[in-house]
Amino acid sequence: MRNYSDDEITRAVEDLLHDIDLGAQPFIDSSKVEDLARAMLDTAQYEKAERVVDYGMKLYPTFSELKLLKASAIIGQETRLDEAKLLLDELEVTLANNEEFNEQKGWFLFSLGDREKALFYFEKCLQIVTDYKDSADTYVLFDIGERLNEENLYEEALVYLKAYNRLEPNTDECLFNIAYAQSNLNMLDESIETYKKLLDIDPFFDSAWFNLGLVYTVKSEYEEALNALQMVISITPTYAEAYFNIGNVQKTLGDRLEAINSYTEYISLCDDDVAPDVYALIGDCWQGLGNFDFAERFANLCIEKDPSNITGMYLLSDVYMSQEKFAEAMNLFKAILKLDPDDAFVLYSIAFCNLRQGRFATARRYANKAIDIDHEMVSAWIVYFRSMSDQALPPKDRQSEAMCAISLAQYITDNQKSLCSDYEEIDSIKFLIGFANYLEGIGKKNDRKRKDGLTMLAQIAQNAPSVFQIGLAEPTIQFLTSRDDIIEIMDRFNIKL
């Protein structure tokens, strides 16, 4: 990395530009102009870089390095590319084998949308730096890698970042960018190791701890994620996004009160710049705690701040369903469906509302639409089968969730052969057959049947954990989560509702 003191450079640039604005003509040697301009380019302050270079070129009009820096500043602004081209064409005669020239030629072509040619020039930079590593500016490799990261070209970025790391080992910003690229390429273990290596060098690098926490979260290693994110706020207590992600992890772990506190701290640090979804997340925590009044308040707060916020509308609909206000919930879900007609969860939710209101044919139709979009939507399968099993129950029994669950299990058992034949590859059907066998084993005190059901459920928990999780969260089957043998499966495969 280049050894610039941010405060010193910023102050020098501001002083120079201030003097120029006042009409002064301060003397500044060419190397100082170059240093100031490079510092502005490295921090993407392209307009300031160009102003510094323009003044330098008045003093040193034939200095080719300054012309190259001016081209860099113009390309960075992504404007006046014709002017940049003229400068590059002029310089190509003498700088064709210069690594900085080839980098800027690459970014010029990148700005024109010619990615293939741009990468050709970047590769030429790599070759020049490799061949002349003792005299070439190795920093261009880092700069290319960092900017390719910003363009989401992570695989290409790694080539240059790793090359730079070989020449300038263990530079913190380079390791940070390598780890970032690795995480975006789903090289999660490699990313963790790189972040750890970086944090051994600089244990107070808060953004590295933050990103490490995110990688652990993606891997569902929640305790490690919490530890990393807690390190962020111990280093920088005002790091708002860390509190937000701590809240997300706590919510995932079922620590809803702690999550509410973390989200609230996030809001307090954000001032007025708070994403409305955060209020919906707080409301969802309150709903999980059984406080529907607070849940409704926060859902409405989310919608008040953003009337088309789907997360808030989802939450309010869910609160209505929890209070068995199915007509109100269905109206909201239909409003969401207008925004996204292919939302399988919304289709399932409308199906469930119709089911609870005794509209079995309509429930079946919406559930079938959801299944067509997502064959593994276990909740939609439950409503689809219940639209037939509930209809067979006496009207008085339809109000009993226990009777509806028993009737569903019996329907699945009665049709198990055809279900296995027609849907043998669908994990949601295997889950429901496991549920039916388990419940039948309990009801008929058939321990073998119960164990067969548990075995099937455990296999789904291992091979398709989202199906197992969503299935148990569906209101018809949720009562199973209080049973010790189901809890054991959830603990074994680290599944939380």
Image (cartoon, rainbow, N blue to C red):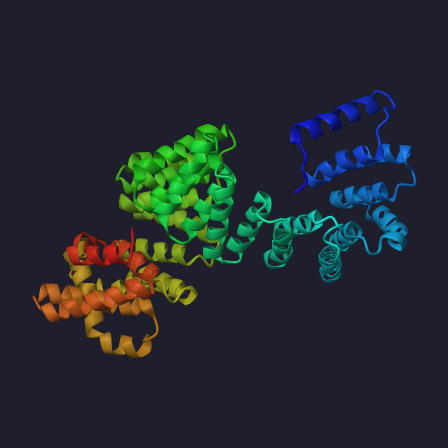
Q: Which residue is pictured at 17% across the width and 58% down the height?
A: 485
The answer, for residue 6, to whether it is visible in the render is: yes
Residue 384 picture quarter: bottom left
Confirm whether residue 476 shows in the render. no
Please tell me whether residue 191 is drawn above or below residue 73 in the rendered image: below
The number of callouts visible is: 0
**Picture coordinates of residue 120 (x, y %)?**
74, 61
Residue at the front extreme, as displayed: 134
Task: Say which of 108 and 94 sits in front.
Answer: 94
In the image, taking residue 164 as reference, residue 263 lies left or right, namely left
Is 3 on the left or on the right of 338, as rendered?
right
Residue most extreme to the right: 62
| 181, 313: nearer the viewer | 181
Q: Quadrant of the N terminus?
A: top right
Locate residue 243, reporting x and y percent: 42, 36
Residue drawn at (69%, 47%) of the image: 139
Identify the image quadrant of residue 415: bottom left
Q: Position of residue 248 (x, y in %)?
A: 39, 43
Q: For the point 73% across and 51% down, which residue is it?
A: 134
Front residue (pair 297, 400): 297
Left or right of residue 25: residue 174: left
Identified at 16% across, 55% down, the residue is: 483
Is 135 placed left or right of 243 in the picture?
A: right
